[in-house]
Amino acid sequence: MHSPQLTPLTRLSRHIRSAAPADAVTAGFLAVLIGITSSVAIVVTAAQAAGATSAQLTSWMFALGIGMGVTCAGLSLRYRAPVVTAWSTPGAALLATGLHGVSMAQAVGAFLLSAVLVIVSGATGWFERVMDRIPVPLASALLAGVLVQFGTGLFTKMQHDFAVVFPMFAVYLACKRWLPRYAVIGALAAGVAVSAVRGEWRLHGLHVALAEPVFVRPEFSWQVLVGVGLPLYVVTMASQNLPGVAVLRGAGYRTPVSPLLTWTGIVNAVLAPFGCFGLNLAAITAAICTGPDAHRDPRRRYLASVWAGLFYVTVGLFGGVVGWLLTAMPTALVMGIAGLGLLGTIGSSLTAALADERMREPAVVTFLATASGITLAGIGSTFWGLLAGVLAVFVLGVRRRGKPAAPEGVRAGAQEPLPEGAPR
């Protein structure tokens, strides 16, 4: 018996549902929303420290948005894995204090040096070799330590802005019970509605226009290269790329790291004259796209990061408008949705970190040191937390087991889908 022939409209509808599942689109949107709103003020401060004009500031948003969008979508499609990139937030914080008295041209020279060093790190493969030797419980504990501030922030904000955050929490729980795929988007809708009714959106000063890139010819001053370019590279690798790889490894994706670094460095270098100061693998926002809320099938979670890339491109094209919109959002709404969107990832990370009894104590050390937020020599707690955990492994004489299994339905390596009927 022949199945009825599908109409063109039906086929189109199926293709759209396949390419744009609601959970993947939501996860991609939340990754961009949280990634930008949590640190856009730091980027603006960094640009102003270098004496950026209004046009140059818009160009920074254009270059960063396009850079993140191209690398997110391109690398995710290439490796069929949820590869999420971001701007270097610790790098922006460093620039905010280190660019005073530095011309924009000299700053661009420092951006280029940092990008070239990232390319070298990827091309030589040394960073990937280091990351492959880190036990998975430590990587999972590192991720949990990075994310725990967002989990506690949910309830901290609830204390200070109960009228907005509690309805989000209540809607999230209700949707988790009856509509689990729409729990996060339902909570976001509730937060937007309540905060709008209360008049908490800062809607003023809107100017609708496409962003225009502004080219700045780089100048190379050895003082700026050593004082800004080298530290920018160090904090980007230690505080961003390191936990970014840990997120992928903790989720079971064995995507090759070296090409990811090489391509983010190349795109960074190309866009540096327009204000792209640092691109790297994301950690917090990547956790949104690698978790089960992004898609039930691990082989399809790469769609979440592809959609994140499309949203990032939109941010770049409409840099001024999007920047205004994101900064207009109430802080309680942003922190609330960040905490809710990461609850599942925090739980799974802690489970993976503590599952191996022999690695439990080093994992706890890593988790606590990372969650402490300690900063030494300008390097954040992600690096020091991992270092403390590795030290505990060596001192306690713990032997690591073999490599972890990839998520169900995902094959280690290039993340290609398993053929139909293959053993799982």
Image (tube, rainbow, N blue to C red):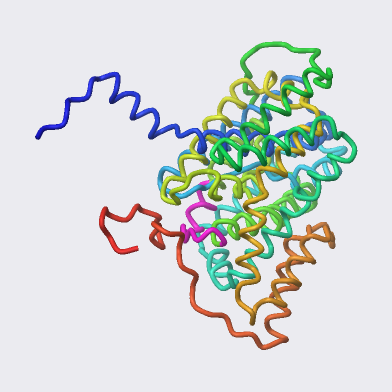
At which x and y percent is residue 397?
66, 88
At which x and y percent is residue 98?
84, 45
The quadrant holding residue 171 is top right
Q: What quarter of the picture does the N terminus occupy?
A: top left
Q: What quarter of the picture does the C terminus occupy?
A: bottom left
Which residue is more in the foreground, 10 or 138? 10
Q: Is residue 396 above or below residue 417?
A: below
Which residue is more in the foreground, 187 or 54? 187
Q: Is residue 395 above or below residue 219?
A: below
Furthest toward the right, the residue is 160
The quadrant holding residue 392 is bottom right
Q: Is residue 335 shown left or right of residue 176? A: right
* Residue 372 belongs to the span the image colors magenta: no
Instruction: Tally the marks.
Output: 0
User: Which residue range is magenta in the image?
Assistant: 250-263
Residue at 55% x, 45% y: name it.
Answer: 293
At which x and y percent is residue 332?
81, 34
Q: Is residue 165 above or below residue 339?
A: above
Residue at 59% x, 35% y: name it.
Answer: 271
